[in-house]
Amino acid sequence: MPSTPITVRWGDMDSYGHVNNVFFIRYLEDTRFALFTPDIFDLFPPGANGLMAGHRIEYRAPLSYSDGPITSTLWITRIGTSSFEIGYRLASAEGATVYAIASTALVIVDAASGRPVPIPDPLRDALTAWIGDPVPFRTP
Amino acid sequence: MPSTPITVRWGDMDSYGHVNNVFFIRYLEDTRFALFTPDIFDLFPPGANGLMAGHRIEYRAPLSYSDGPITSTLWITRIGTSSFEIGYRLASAEGATVYAIASTALVIVDAASGRPVPIPDPLRDALTAWIGDPVPFRTP
Amino acid sequence: MPSTPITVRWGDMDSYGHVNNVFFIRYLEDTRFALFTPDIFDLFPPGANGLMAGHRIEYRAPLSYSDGPITSTLWITRIGTSSFEIGYRLASAEGATVYAIASTALVIVDAASGRPVPIPDPLRDALTAWIGDPVPFRTP
Amino acid sequence: MPSTPITVRWGDMDSYGHVNNVFFIRYLEDTRFALFTPDIFDLFPPGANGLMAGHRIEYRAPLSYSDGPITSTLWITRIGTSSFEIGYRLASAEGATVYAIASTALVIVDAASGRPVPIPDPLRDALTAWIGDPVPFRTP
């Protein structure tokens, strides 16, 4: 599955001295932009955006600035009519430490109307090539 | 259930012109610090912190700077041995528009060892007073 | 001179346990949006934006989450042909502690061409009403 | 002079579609941590921190996510008894476009007392090796 290095900024840490949980959601965004540009984003219908429907994340290990850069791996866990779901694993560069696992649901919408738009076949094919296992969340 | 105003900064918006999904997770943190200080945090065992175990969030409506400040409502959805779960509703000041619903799982850990610490009775009583319904997520 | 409360988020603090210097620049932005909306921004020429030309800031005292909200006071220190300069004082709510003083230079530009646009008379009049002393920086 | 690549995150852009001016100050911090670790920071006196005294920045060209990563170059412009000043140039990877120039004044302080601490000779020598020209600000 595709992966990308993710930069950890010193300023991502909070007053507990670890990367704040909020920035992990930023790393998910960094991952999408790194890996979906241009292959996936260019296959979006003209005038359509990916609307964030939701996130789920489980934190597995504390992360510090000195641990970075980390490696983020992304795959597709579900493809619907106008929506799809992404799985992520944020791990150390060599992969031994998993910092978080997460999923994101995106809906393809027309930017002007905000209405869902069916996923066109070329985008569906590209997403299908990255299909992987469900994210192994511990809690139901 | 307790609620607090949450400030929306102009800079919370991204290049799509809406508040970026990452900042909603910041608003959950803002909510905890506003409503748990001092009543809940002061009941944590000495030397213990709340460790973030995970988040789940569903976005319901786009939010802009001009919509703020918004109102965040918090309640408790589960209390375990060393952990508890929080529900949130981020809505317009008058409550008519719901921007997001979310949940957070926190584990009480000893700051030095990182090991889970049982929730002491006074904290359990305070959390119990805020018990509410499960967060009405659309997806399973 | 006009002033506005500024929210300090817990997450604005860094791993030294104080509000990170970067967020003071965010507070300057918060101040502009709070105090320039709508009175100043609505007097910008149609299709024109304020382009950030530069900042200068001196930090005077450490700031923590528990010190907030703080009070930001803004005034105008210079008005040119197409640009103007803003002074700021970020202080405790009661004004006894000054956390930082700062200045910002803004150029009015046409959003499409990026070219400077002369300040129209109504905007010049509004800015003139807020003219104040130079920012008392310690260093030259 | 030493330089480092700086990551531009998509989320660093604001609703005008360019990197927000606030994040340039974050890039200055990123630059210090990249280039001062470990050579400069390890020469700080035990128990001493660098306290931010101030920043000055001039913005020269708009920056977008697609322009990154950029290159940040750092040098020393002044060394005092307990303080020193840093110059920066944030430019495109190949150096043709300068996005901003900036300076930072840091004071070495004892972390416990907050009192200035004299710069020890090894640190002074290391800083001296990076001495460069004043930052070419346009405005006085």
Image (spheres, coloured by chain):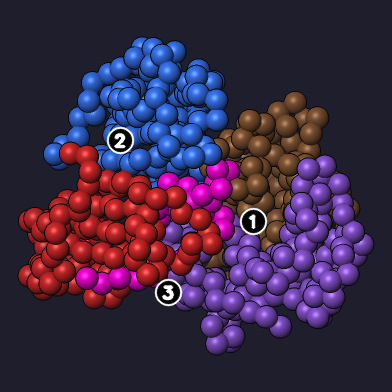
Chain colours: A blue, B red, C purple, D brown
Q: Amino acid at mark 1?
A: Pro
Determine whether the residue tagged by mark 1 lies in a helix, strand or loop: loop
Relative to residue B10, is residue A17 drawn left or right?
left
Determine whether the residue tagged by mark 2 lies in a helix, strand or loop: strand
Q: On the image, numbered disc 1 is attached to which residue? A: D120
Q: Gap in Å between the C-alphas at discs 2 and 1?
A: 47 Å
Kindly identify the residue that appears in the image at 27 percent across and 18 percent down. Answer: A132
Quarter where residue A58 is shown: top left
Q: Gap in Å between the C-alphas at discs 2 and 3?
A: 32 Å
- Which residue of the protein is positioned furthest toward the right in this rendering? C81
In the image, B56 versus B92, the foreground residue is B92
Residue B19 lies in the magenta stretch? yes
Q: What is the x, y in percent for residue C2?
A: 67, 80
Q: Which chain letter goes with mark 1? A: D
**Which quadrant would the C terminus of chain A be assigned to in this image?**
top left
Kindly identify the residue that appears in the image at 70 percent across and 56 percent down. Answer: D104
Q: Gap in Å between the C-alphas at discs 1 and 3?
A: 35 Å
- Rate crowding at label 3 as few (under 14), some (14 to 19) or many (20 or more) other CA atoms within 10 Å: few
Q: On the image, numbered disc 3 is attached to which residue? A: C66
Residue A83 lies in the magenta stretch? no
Q: On the image, numbered disc 2 is attached to which residue? A: A102
Q: Amino acid at mark 3?
A: Ser
Q: What segment carries the magenta color? A: B1-26
Kindly identify the residue that appears in the image at 14 percent across and 63 percent down. Answer: B132
